[in-house]
Image (cartoon, helix red, strand yellow):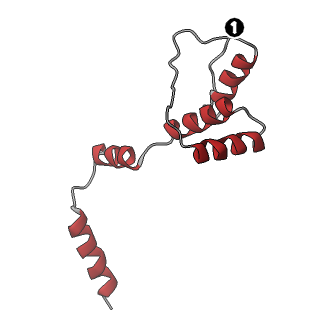
Amino acid sequence: MLHWSGSARGSLAPKCIQWRRNGATMAGVPSVQIKDVPADVHAVLRQRAAAAGQSLQEYLLGRLVADARRPSLEEVLDRARQRAGGSTSFSEAARLIRADRDEP
């Protein structure tokens, strides 16, 4: 049985990679195919994968998982906007900080 309980960081990539090494397929799990990768970019990615002791597939899966789990700046800002609290505009906050700095 495959257990999907990730580590403290929640990483599933190593478990997925190990499962695939054993020849299993993951029914119902989406795949991504990227076409028209420039040759120089492909070469760099293959070198980085080799340096990490991984296949290109393993390396790219790890990078995609890490990137998807890290919130984008827009996502962080959206979460901040949704929090209850003050309603001071950026310009007002900047004005107040400048005034505070200028006080003797």
Of residue 84 and residue 36, the one placed in the foreground of this image is: 36
Q: Nearer the viewer, residue 10 or 38?
A: 38
Residue at image location 65% in from the left, 29% down from the top: 57
Q: Is residue 36 left or right of residue 51?
A: left
Vertical placement of 53 versus 88: above or below?
above
Image quarter hosting the N terminus: top right
Q: Of 68 and 10, which appears nearest the observer? A: 68
* x and y, in percent, of residue 34 in the image: 50, 31
Query: Can the viewer see residue 7 in this picture?
Result: no
> What residue lies at 59% left-to-right and 43% top-to-bottom?
39
Task: Tell me the residue that label 1 is attached to.
Answer: 1
* Residue drawn at (53%, 39%) of the image: 37
The spot of residue 23 in percent (x, y) is: 73, 12
Is residue 19 at least partly visible in the picture? yes
4 horizontally vs 79: left or right: right
Q: Amino acid at mark 1?
A: Met
